[in-house]
Amino acid sequence: MVPKHVWSKKNQFRYTLGTMTILIAALLSGCFKLAPDMADLDTTTIPYEHPDLADSDTVIESFDTELLCPDGKPSRVHVVYQPTGEAPSAAAIVMHSGAFDYVVEKGTSGPLSGPHYHVEPRLTQEFSVRKVWETLGLQTSDIDPAERNRGALTAVLANRGVIQFLPGNCWGDMWHNEAGAQDNDVDEEGFVRNGRTLAKWTLRVATDADFAASQGIEGLTAPSDTPVYLMGLGSGGRGVLELLRDSETPDIAGALIDSVPDDLSAYTLNPVDFRDEIAGLELIFGSDSLDTIADQSLAIGDDLLPPRVAYLWSSGNPQIPADAMRPAAEALNGVIGVRVNDIREAQHVISNSDRIIAEDTVRFLMD
C-alpha cells in the first residue's frame, strides 16, 4: 500500500549501456504488481543518498503502472520527495534522455529478438530504470558517454523541497507516441509505443489527486495551488514539448529544455549521414510526417511556452547535431521569460552535470 502523506500548507543516438549499480539490481528484483482492482499498489521506498543533498530524509519511491513496455514488463515511475508532512514548494516532471531505439532487423523469436539500433536494447523496463537511476546520479557510469549525469539537477530540486516525478521511458519513442492518438507503426514493429502516454499519466498523477487515487496512488499529488514545472533532458525535452502542446495539460509555471533534438529535419534532410536515425524516426512519427517534421520545432512559434523557459544547448554537443538545436535557440533568444544558453562545450545534457548551472537554472525558473 502506498503510504498516505498529508501535505500541510506550509553515432548520434547510439551508445552501449554502462555498469548497473547494486541499488538498481535491488530495484529490478522487487515486486511491483498492480492489484486487479487498482486499490493497492506495491512500492519500494529507499533513501536518496547524494552528496549535494541538504536533507538526509529525502527518499525515492517507485511504483509500476499498467502501461506495458515492449518487453511485456510494466513501465515504472520514480518519485523523489521529503516525507515530512510539509507541502512541496513545487512539483516537477523530469523526463530523461536517451529515449530512442528500434529493432533494425526482425528476428524469429518475437518483435524484439533482432538487432537493435543500440547495442543493448532500450525497449525494456530494465533500461528505463537504469536511465532514471542515472539521472538521479546514482549510477557509476553513464549509459550515454556524451553525458555526465551526476544528479545535479535532481539534487538541487530536492534541496528546494520540490517533489519530482521521473517516468521511465521504455519505448524508445522520444516521448512522442500515444496509442490511439499518436501511434507508431505497430504493424511493422509488432508492439505499441507509449512514451507520451506515460508522460501524460505521470503529470496527471502529480496534479490530480482524484485521478491518482483511482490509480491506487494516494498522498503524492501536490496541492492544487502548487506550481508545476516540466523538465526534459535530451530527448526528454521533446517530452516537454509534447505535454505543452497537449490540450489537457494544466497550467505550467516553467520548463527546462536541455540538449533537445528539437528540429528533426536536421536528420531527415541529411539521409546519407543519418540513414539509421531516419529509419527509426519513420517508425515513431510515420514516414508521411517526416516531410513536415520541422513544423514541430520550437523555432516555428513560441505561443505554447509557459511564463519561464530555460533553453540549454551546446553548439559543441557530440551527440546531437547543432542544426537540431540552433534554430530554436535563435528563435527563442530575446523572448520575454526565456533564457537561452549555449555552453559551447563537448557535452550532452548540461544541467544535470554541474551543480552551479543547475542551481542557476532552477533559480531562474522558480524565483
Image (spheres, helix red, strand yellow):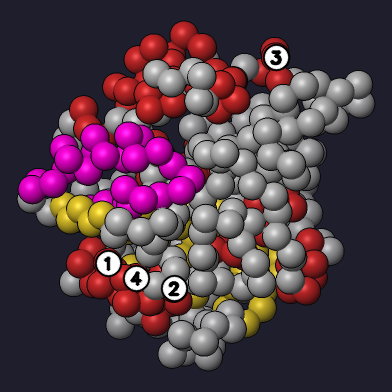
Q: Secondary structure at mark 4?
A: helix
Q: Secondary structure at mark 1?
A: helix
Asked if labels 1 and 4 touch by Cβ distance under 8 angstroms, the answer is yes
Q: Is residue 115 visible?
A: yes
The residue tagged 3 is 188
In the image, which residues are magenta? 309-335
* CA gap, disc 3 and disc 1: 41 Å
- Of mark 2 and mark 1, the one earlier in the sequence is 2
- Kind of residue sitting beneath label 2: Ala
- Which mark, by number, is residue 346? none
Asked if labels 2 and 4 touch by Cβ distance under 8 angstroms, the answer is yes
On-image quarter of the N terminus: bottom right
Seen at 56% across and 21% down, the residue is: 275
The residue tagged 1 is 361
Q: Quadrant of residue 367?
A: bottom left
Estimate how packed mark 2 is, as few (under 14), some (14 to 19) or many (20 or more) residues with alpha carbons within 10 Å.
Answer: many
- Which mark, by number, is residue 358? 4
- Kind of residue sitting beneath label 1: Thr
* CA gap, disc 3 and disc 2: 40 Å
Q: Secondary structure at mark 3?
A: helix
Estimate how packed mark 4 is, as few (under 14), some (14 to 19) or many (20 or more) residues with alpha carbons within 10 Å.
Answer: many
